[in-house]
Amino acid sequence: MFHRKLTASDGTALALYRWVPAGGGSAHPPLLLVPELGFGRETFDFGDGGLAAYLVERGREVYVIELRGQGQSAAPPGWRLRDLVERDLPEAVAAIRASRPGPIDLVAHGYSGTLALAAAVRELDGAVGRVIALSTPAVPEVPNSTAEAFLAGGGKLASLAGDPAGARAFDLLFARGANIAPPRHALLRSTAVSDLSPAAAADLLGWMRTGDLALADASTVQARLARYTRPTLLVLPIGDAFAHPEHASALRDLSRAPIVPLLLNRRDWMAEDYTHLSMLAGSGAPADVFAPALAFLDGKAPVAGGGAGASR
Amino acid sequence: MTRAFLAACALAGISACSSSYSDPLPAQAVRHRVKTADGWDLSLVKYPPVGTTRGRPVLLCHGVGANDRSMDLDDRHSLARWFAAHGRETWTMSLRATGDSDRPDPKAGRPSGYDFDTLWRQDVAAAVAYVRAQTGGGPIDYVGHSMGGMLIYAYLSQGGQGLGAVATLGSPTRLDWGGAIEPLVEGVGEVAVNGRWLLPLALSSHLSAGLQATLEDGPIQLIFYNPKNVEPATWARLAAIGTADISGAVALQLLGLMRTGAFGSADGTLDYRKDLGKVRTPVLVVAAKLDRIAVTPAVKDGFRALGGEKEWFLAGQESGAEADYGHLDLVVGERASTEIFPRLLDFFDRHAGSGGLPRP
């Protein structure tokens, strides 16, 4: 894994990580993985595995961008969600394309994932190939009172691990009943999380309350998504309590994109009723999520319920 | 001979075991019959209000493969008795060929092969009109579980009148979510289902009720309910007395919905989803977090399409329930009487003044 520092147009330092498959290059388009707000590289890279390693082992060149406020990237005071769309994502994509011209495939997680989809029609126009959208709410609503209280309190995600009540809230929102190995769970609740800025927390809460988010070019996220056309695998974990599947599913109606839904639940012989984090960190994720995602990126029909069941 | 005798004994034993789950209607329940415009007698059961009457009458409609007893399983699991205990005159109905309603009989002018469209045009319309006529002619409230909610969506979307407020429980309007089970259901369904048959669900459910009581987390249980909310004995009782055969034509129409993502009439002339935008009757849409039949995106689709006043409630731990709800938990869950039913009554009470607002 290589790590390099990028500088966004306002001077904010961003961390970009790169994994190269054994033997060097890849014939496939590079993949950019975008973590959820408040989380960082670790949601894709647990050290002992994760989506990044899974893809690299299968011949993909993989990048993870930590946007402002995430992981090792800077968190300038008062940063806003629109900064991710207008500054950070374009910087990351430009850096990748400088060495690998051509389209980039995207793996987008949660609310920052939705912002990446919104950027795909303007700031990243022409740069995005296929997309894996992991619980990306197109028309968000306040999912529950726990999320509302967390955001109204300033979005201090890192402090949630600090006391039993915070830990319960963290689990309810992100990992309730999930089959995540204890070391990964501990990592996700401690070093993997960062506080949102108060302004970003207010942005996210306002987005949930109104269903839409204004962007600086006088458009909105919904207006952007109405113009979104990228072939997309829309991953919907039934147990997600932070970005509900019924909020993400609206992308099918809102956009003009060819959307393939992938519902993650035990009914379809999957390992668990996946949550916001277990779809990336759960013990069954390689078979139930990663394999169908890779198949979709390769232009094949994803097989729900264990496209690579033998590896479970 | 010996084998036949043993098989007969086993069948009798299983049947006797399943019969132990039967539960009579409460003494105060009164059976009624109503004839549809196309000549079928439907069974309705009236539950008089306990104490002072409070609010409009309520009509409860079950889902596909079920009958009226799914709304009144026993004293602990009964939306009907719960509403009556809270002062509402309550009625349950059995759609044609379910419960004590007429079975198909071509010689008597009741052909098989009726579809989803027939159920709302004939059965729901007749039941609504009858209950209104019996209760003074004013608007009534309505609760539909699963397909019972889909039927009222179709009824309202095509201008159906007489309802003050409506609650739907786990009622999807879009079924093309691409799950692994869908191609299987579709493939098997197309081959196995003849539009003129009745799928014999009731007998197999009745006979297997004793077995069902011993299973807590099997594949069938997993699909239909969350074992954290429904005890095996409750599921067994539902299997024994609350299930019904399914019309092949209804099954085929639902399979078509699964294939196309549409929510419309079998002949394609009516788009129920689009016409939900014209509905002005207040609707409470209840979805279950772990519903694997009416998944939340499928239920939300109907909520988004509704054009009038509407509210959304997601039944699960996030909203204060002890456990996430599955599809059947919404009506027979062990804690539904404290976690779900009061929300329906509260919604109806808050819309006591609405009388079926005119459509634009």
Image: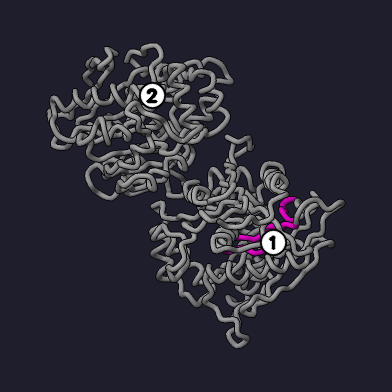
Q: Position of residue B280 (x, y in %)?
A: 59, 53
Question: Which segment is the magenta one?
Answer: B57-80
Q: Of the numbered discs in the image, which one, if any, rests on residue A81?
A: 2
Q: Quadrant of residue A6?
A: top left
Residue drawn at the location 75% of the way across and 61% of the way down? B23
Which image quadrant for residue B260? bottom left
How crowded pointer 2 is (Cα within 10 Å; few <14, some 14-19, many 20+) is rated as many
Task: Using the image as rendered, state which of residue B236 and residue A149 is in the foreground.
Answer: A149
Residue sitting nearer the eye, B48 or B223: B48
Which quadrant would the C terminus of chain B be assigned to in this image? Answer: bottom right
- A278 sits to left or right of B113: left
Pointer 2 indicates a residue of which chain? A
Specify whether residue B69 is painted magenta.
yes
Q: Are marks 1 and 2 on the same chain?
A: no
Task: State which mark lies toward you, 1 or 2.
Answer: 2
Q: Secondary structure at mark 2?
A: helix
The circle drawn on residue B69 is 1
Quadrant containing the N terminus of chain B is: bottom right
Residue drawn at 44 percent across, 71 percent down: B267
Q: Is residue A163 left or right of residue A55?
A: right
Quick check: B247 left or right of A108?
A: right
Can you give x and y, in whole percent of width and height, for residue A232 in the image?
A: 30, 43
